[in-house]
Image: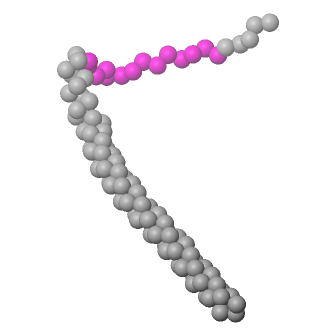
Amino acid sequence: MRAATWEMRSFLGASAAIAVAFVLALAYLASSTGVATAGYEAQRLQATRDELRRRNTLLELELAKLDAPARIDSEAKRLGLVRVPFIPVVQAEPLTARK
């Protein structure tokens, strides 16, 4: 009877140790998979950020070209607009409330 009890305790102890090792291995795999997934996501986001920065730089260059005074003058001439030597300003009369 004593031998059977000792064998049972040994079996249960070994089984528990194996189960704990298995759970720890699963936790490690889940953790490393999560880290790898986060790394891939970070790389994807960095690539997206780099592409958006490149596009932003191109748009800033295009804006600088479009804002150039020489381009605006040439476009105005093409549309038939002329530069006015002076701009008349009309003074507004002060408004008073009627009673």
Q: Which residue shows up at 55% across the image and 72% down it?
A: 23
Say above or below: 95 vs 34: above
Q: Which residue shows up at 80% across the image and 6% down it?
A: 99
**Is residue 85 visible from the viewing direction of this image?**
yes
Horizontal placement of 86 versus 29: left or right?
A: left
> Most prominent secondary structure in the magenta stretch?
loop
Q: Nearer the viewer, residue 52 or 92?
A: 52
Horizontal placement of 59 versus 74: left or right?
A: right
Question: Which span is picked out in magenta?
Answer: 81-94
Q: Position of residue 46 (x, y in %)?
A: 36, 57
| Colour setting | one colour
Say above or below: 76 vs 23: above
- Residue 72 lies in quadrant: top left
**Is residue 13 visible from the viewing direction of this image?**
no
Horizontal placement of 88 versus 5: left or right?
A: left
Q: Nearer the viewer, residue 15 or 29?
A: 15
